[in-house]
Amino acid sequence: MSRRVVYTIAGLVCFGMAFASNAKELAEIENELSAHWERIRTYSARIEMKGQAAQGASTVEMNGKGSIEGMKKDTTMLYRMEMDQTISMGESEMPNKMLVVYDGTEVFTQTSMLGQTMVFTSKPEEQSQVMPGGGKEAFKRMHEQFEMKVMPDDTLNDEPVYVLELRPKQDAASQPKAPGKSQFDKALLSLSQKTGFPLKMLMFDDGEKPIMTLTYKEYKLDPELNPARFAYTPPPGAIVMDAESLKQMGGTP
């Protein structure tokens, strides 16, 4: 099975850390949520993922649980995401351990399944359209990649949220998909009105069918974190690929 599905999950999980709202204008919401994130130095949360993706004539189901952490270095939010996944196709199941680290310079996506560890390296601009952490830079990237629409406000876990609809722009949607690039036609992103932290992201295919749900639970703002968590070195024996290598292979590892 192609590892493209696995890398896509990493990008989508990390992508969930950006935002928006309803009764207010988008620009007003951007300023409000960016101000929240200016005050945040670190964060942590549990994440859960459920989804499915077409793999030829078959359907791949994906379920995972893990954690995500972030630490601001100067004005850049570093992050680390770890997830244990089960990838199912028909009667077969494959466990996968995923690790994604952004050290401020490169994004490292490590997967371990079928006895093989692979690492995909990329620059932030080659990875997800929106980097975890939010703020003005995140909104800038969002505007470059998506048509953004404010949806009615909602409530999740008794917490008022803003909801933003994201649709990939035509020029972005027509490009070959690399790991971390959007694989959906529409996404609904729900963010805490009080903190700006993402609580849920729901993705749909071009037929408006839900294909992926990400939920962020038990989030903490400004916890004590070890800076060493945001450094990365590929393990011995790992196969390492960069963006150019992936491009030469047609976008599919």
Image: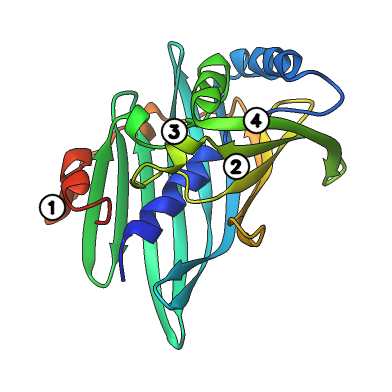
Question: Which badge, 2 or 3, is on the more N-terminal residue?
Answer: 2
The label nearer to you, 4 versus 2, is 4
Tag 2 residue: 45
Q: In what quadrant of the picture does the C terminus appear?
A: bottom left
Question: Which badge, 2 or 1, is on the more N-terminal residue?
Answer: 2
Contact? badges 4 and 2 (CB < 8 Å):
no
* Res 151 → quadrant: top right
Q: How many marks?
A: 4
- Residue 200: x and y in percent read 68, 46
Tag 1 residue: 236
Residue appearing at x 27%, y 50% in the figure: 251
The type of residue carrying mark 4 is Met
Q: Is residue 218 left or right of residue 159?
A: left
Element type where label 1 sits in the image: loop
Question: Which badge, 4 or 1, is on the more N-terminal residue?
Answer: 4
Question: Which badge, 4 or 3, is on the more N-terminal residue?
Answer: 3
Tag 3 residue: 79
Question: How many C-alpha atoms fall within 10 Å of the one at disc 2: few (<14), some, or many (≥20)?
Answer: many
Q: Let me know if residue 18 appears in the view.
A: no
Q: CA distance from mark 4 to mark 2?
A: 25 Å
Question: Which badge, 4 or 2, is on the more N-terminal residue?
Answer: 2
Q: Nearer the viewer, residue 90 or 182?
A: 182
Residue appearing at x 73%, y 15% in the figure: 32
